[in-house]
Amino acid sequence: MGRSRDVRFVSSGVKLPSSSAPAPSPSPAPAPALLSAALPFAHIGRAIDAAARRLGACLPRVPVARADTAPPPPVRRHGKDAGGGGEERVLISEVAVRGKDGEPLERPELEAAAAAALRACRPNAALTVREVQEDVHRVVESGLFRSCMPVAVDTRDGIRLVFEVEPNQDFHGLVCEGANMLPSKFLEDAFRDRHGKIINIRHLDQVIKSVNGWYQERGLTGLVSYAEILSGGILRLQVSEAEVNNINICFLDRKTGEPTVGKTQPETILRQLTTKKGQAYNRAQVKRDVETILTMGIMEDVTIIPQPVGDSNKVDLVMNLVERPSGGFSAGGGISSGITNGPLSGLIGSFAYSHRNVFGRNKKLNLSLERGQIDSIFRLNFTDPWIDGDNKRTSRTVMVQNSRTPGTLVHGGDHPDHGPITIGRVTAGVEYSRPFRPKWSGTLGLIFQHAGARDDKSNPIIRDFYNSQLTASGNAYDDTLLAKFESIYTDSGDHSSTMFVFNVEQGLPVLPEWLSFNRVTARLRQGYEIGPARLLLSASGGHVEGNFPPHEAFAIGGTNSVRGYEEGAVGSGRSYAVGSGEVSCRMFGPLEGVVFGDYGSDLGSGPKVPGDPAGARGKPGSGYGYGVGVRVDSPLGPLRLEYAFNDKQARRFHFAVGYRN
């Protein structure tokens, strides 16, 4: 192991002369057959050609005529080649292996290795030139010899065939040029135990293949373009790596495919790329860059085409982009989870305007209005996915919202002589989000909320039918300034993968009448593949401490909580815990069958909510449900139709769009 200090690694920008192997193409990794012309085995062909010429010159002239006594003996030929090639055979009486100078080799193991490589050339065998040539090929292909020359000598006992071999040098060092990305340890480990030993070309060929494989496995365009043995037993490897020269952006027309003027600023695209000018060309990295640009939502199609730059190892990347329409109006509908009475009472209609590429900088503007029988939400969002001048990919969202939602989740079950309670909220705030670790992202926000309860005539009220308070301050409205922190872990984009969400909200009493409370929630989801079925386990929980309005209590029960119960019918508490398990299996086409079970509890915190709305309405505080359902994939997400039973022996249909929270 100590001798490995003599192995040295050098990385330089020395360019190969034009006679060397060409630079690698930026297309997918080259086939091994393309490498052989420049690698150490190239001298095998030269050695064999030289051997053939030598055999052609010597074998026909033996045995040599003697100058003394009797006439020359007849040449010992044994008919035609049995292989049908028409070659004449010559009887060989002796076969030997010697050094280039005709003397025995210094290392007996080398002589034994050369002799072991011979197949046809044996004493007292009738050989053709082709058979001798094949044995020469085997000797050189053993990897230990740089040349092998057969010499036929006439002796008193017959023709003696001598294979004069020249062993390779002993390995004493390595020079590797151009390998800017290849770790030095990779080659150090490959040659660690070779110091002082004969350079084996077969071993070197395996190392070269492993180097090329290292580049290919990582999606890099690189290969060993040249290898040679220098004097003193120094190996020299020349590695060619493709380098990104320039990145050019070309916008194409959606209909004609012809070049056009794009609306997106080029720097908005370039800043998304992890591939930069001067880096090694990495096909896997370029593929990820394409996916990143598509996730921006402003491009319909993205392709990146590498183009070689002259005779250099550099490539230009041409990025062809097809832009989507920047924005427009849309209309749709949905279902409110807070309305439980009447088959059509939960339907919501929506109208929206969106612009996904404001100022050509990928900034998003969304203006929407949703209206139902009771629900109404007006929302204005402006999002900058990547703040200018920030290198952490921080996004910023400014939002303003005016909503009116049913209060039935907490205050349902009112007296029939009194209309439903609704909760009106005016909200405004700003949030900053960014990834801070792989698969982790975080959000910080500051949100102001002005909220209160209203009756069916939209008049503010502070107490319900049970004389329970509806606001925390005792006024018609509560004002709250919330500082928000949220952290999300996602294993992948698949819904059945691991996900963890942790959220903290803190009410800041900037003014004495503003509410002060702390709310902590967490959600966990984990999926498992069990043969053709999929098991999905989920759990959520939370706690709120301080002065808060009762409509902010945790509502338990319903489509996204404990199925088999109406929305919020299990309980309303300061704390809660809900667990769910379901097994799904693909039936046919887009249809999927589901078996599920849910359990939820307010952990005994229902009476601690201001006004005890759950106790006044006789909510149990805990319960479970189970049932079956089907799901159908749709452009809006999975359509869920579920039929559930609860522990009170009641049964209920649930219909929803999208995955369960």
Image: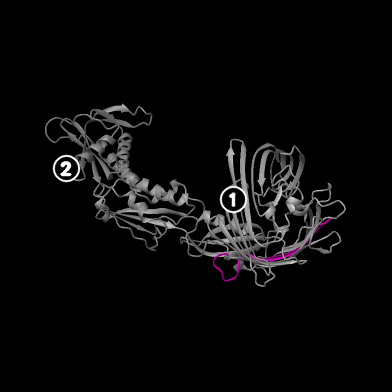
Majority secondary structure in the magenta region? strand
- In the rendered image, residue 625, in percent from the top left (x then y), is placed at 70, 40
- In the rendered image, residue 304, in percent from the top left (x then y), is placed at 58, 58
Residue type, mark 2 in image: Glu
Please report the bounds of the magenta region as a residue range.
364-393
**Does residue 412 show up?**
yes
Pick out the residue farthest to the left: 68
Question: Secondary structure beneath disc 2?
Answer: loop
Dot placed on the residue nearer the N-terminal end, 1 or 2? 2
Residue at figure coordinates x 24%, y 52% from the top left: 2
- In the rendered image, residue 288, in percent from the top left (x then y), is placed at 56, 55
Looking at this view, is 540 or 460 the one in front? 460
Residue at figure coordinates x 24%, y 55% from the top left: 232
Q: Mark number for residue 102?
A: none
Looking at this view, is 612 or 239 the one in front? 612
- In the rendered image, residue 222, in percent from the top left (x then y), is placed at 45, 54
Give the CA distance from mark 1 to mark 2. Answer: 75 Å
Q: Relative to 363, say whether 623 is above or below.
A: above
**Circle 2 Cα neighbour tier, 10 Å, few/some/many (<14 / 14–19 / ≥20):** few
Q: Quadrant of residue 13?
A: bottom left
Looking at this view, is 314 or 267 the one in front? 267
- Residue tagged 1: 499
**Does residue 337 show up?**
no
**Circle 1 Cα neighbour tier, 10 Å, few/some/many (<14 / 14–19 / ≥20):** many
Question: Secondary structure beneath disc 1?
Answer: strand
Q: Quadrant of residue 398?
A: bottom right
Residue type, mark 1 in image: Met
- Residue tagged 2: 103
